[in-house]
Amino acid sequence: MRHDALSRFSDVSFLVLSSLAEGPKHGYAMIQDIEQFSGTRLEPGTLYGAISRLERQGWIEALPAEDRRRPYCVTPDGLAALQAYVRTLEQVVSVGRRRLVDAGNP
Amino acid sequence: MRWILGLYPQAWRARYGDEMEALLDEYPASWLTGADLMLGALAAHGDQVRGLLRQQHGIPPVTREQCLSIGLGVGWLMPWLIVLHDERAILVLPLIGAAFFELAFSKPSAREFLAALAGAIGLGWMLGHIAGAVACAIAAWAGWASWDSAPRTGLYVRLTIAFVMLTILVLGRPQWWPVLPTAIGIGVLGVAEGQRPASIGPRHWWGLGVAVVISAAGLSLLVYGVLKLLDGGFPLGWLVLPLGTGVGTLALGSRRRPPLGGVRHGYRGGLVALALVGAGIAALALPLLPEDHLPVRAGLLAAVGVGAGLGALALGRPLSKGPNRPGRRWAGLAIMAAALGLVMYTAAARGTTPGSSFITRRCVDGHCVPTGFLGWLSGSRAMRSRQSLMLPLAAGAVLLGAGAWSRRRLLSAWEPKDVAAYPPETHLERRPLAPPSGDPPDLHHTRLVMYEGLRRAAGRAHAAHPHETVREWFHRVYGPQALSAVVLYEEVRYGDIKDSAERAAAALRLWPAAPRRQLRSRPRPWMVRESRGPATRLAHLFAVLTVAAMSAGMMGIVPPHEGTGAFIRSYETGSRFGPSGHAVMRSESPGPPSG
């Protein structure tokens, strides 16, 4: 399990959007989900830094609070951004894989 | 771990604070979590600055409270500069105060305010070089960045931080540490402000009793120390007294907010001011402290400065009795500033030893001459010119004149177009009050409902700014549709109440009625509609730069300025005073010709 300071500099927004693409989640549920599907454990400061940026960009939005916990959901703009990012990643992955094969390192 | 959340910007905490706390309750925290939260706080401050740069709505006026907080910060700083460097620093205090008061009452833009701030920091640099400039920035940040919250917790906590950091940075000497409990007391005050319960109970009275006991013990130690009946009693008393004040504040913090708000703040501020000013002036007035006990004298002088500022604010709020009468509060500030200037002038005129009494003597080779105020009266022409009272008096006149002029301008400057100067705070949560009862509605009940609305609105983040008219206030809070509420308010307030009751039910739906906790945790548009956003954001930038500069200084990257501390060392080594501790006075007459 990866649990290092570099997680701050990874693409946390991508992880958050990917988590919320499944459905609305509050902060702690997001941390658990991201840890489960990516092996990256986000710290609260990192997570809420990303949440505030995404909310400001209009890619996620807050739902009514449940007790003190507030779930977030991804907006249509956020889904579009996530799709674009995934397409870019897929292209990078395919190119990288092809070049590795070309270099004799399958 | 939750305390780290206090390092985040106010607006951030208002938006994410509750859910972040809920998350931290569930999250298995480690040291890495703490480091991550601190980095997150820095990033949030950076986000604010970037948001400012993106903002396209111009720079709004800086509020009077922010200017006043800067004035208080600079006023608090000045005694340190006087002690550390040059008694001539006294001359700039009233001028700086006048500048900030003038700015405060003329609703300056952030650009103007930044220009004044740069000037103050430049003065600090000139007087104190690196240490003075950094200290100015700390004081400015502490006041400026924190005055935007309805509960004053942030202000007091950051002032505490500023006190502690400044003490460590500029002074760094154990004998100055008595300043620290003062900071702790102020911090406790802030916590009490933010966590007062809704009702008063027996435990609060117990707390008040404990506070009285602690304060009495502190005062007793002070007196015993001053009278030299107990060795070390004075610093010990100075340690204990603020703790008593803090506990008392916690106990008194349980009082309910009175109608229209503010009086409780004034009462509490008066309590703190009384503790600080009383202890400080009592010790300053008694010339019994050792001549070379410079740190305690300087600490007392600083306490007097802070106490004077708090007292002025405390006096001003209950006296003003509303949002549109700043004159009396301003008068209180002017009086306090003038008194502080006189006290400090006397300290300086005595010959670089702050905190001296008005009637003092200095003996050289058995020949005693009066110094201080009497020294100015009876001294030689050279002494009078050197210790001229004219400059501080002129500065005080400038202060008063500027204040009078700005007040006159304030009273005559309102125009209807000013109503649109502030964007409405459309994010406020609104719930209707209970409509007036009776058919037709009972007039007295209508008035009660109206005052209940005022009570709910006063004292919160969206309360009336001191310089605002009622129309400006209502427009800012409720938007253009607030005119009906304004009319209703004016009718109820000024007696023209013919058909008020019928319109009350409709107009009162505009009042924000959410309880305090709901208001604090409501969703607030992040980085967009902060009414004091740019100033606060720039102040946070200041905070980041200040912390960086302080870190560099502490790590030795920035060499200490030679002048800082040299003044104190000169006292300790006796170079400014003779071996007996008396001042060495230079003869101005030329020596006999050689040969």
Image (cartoon, rainbow, N blue to C red):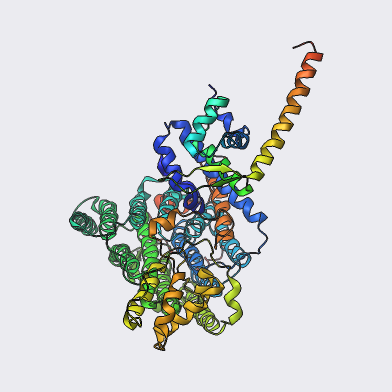
| x 40%, y 79%: residue | B377
Name the side, left or right, on which B178 lies relative to B79.
left
Residue B436 can be seen in this image: yes
> Above or below — where is B381 with respect to B42?
below
Outermost residue on the top side: it is A104
B332 vs B276: above or below: below
Most foreground residue, B363 or B549: B549
Tell me the residue at 49%/30% (across/down): A32
Residue B539: x and y, percent? Answer: 55, 56
Left or right: residue B25 compared with residue B39:
left
Residue farthest to the front? B439
Quadrant containing the C terminus of chain B is bottom right
Q: Residue at x 36, y 64 (%)?
A: B307
Residue B276 found in image quarter: bottom left
Q: Nearer the viewer, residue B397 or B368?
A: B397
Percent position of residue B525, x then y: 55, 55
Examine the rendering and report whether any part of residue B367 can be seen.
no
Query: Looking at the image, is B313 positioned above or below residue B296?
Result: below
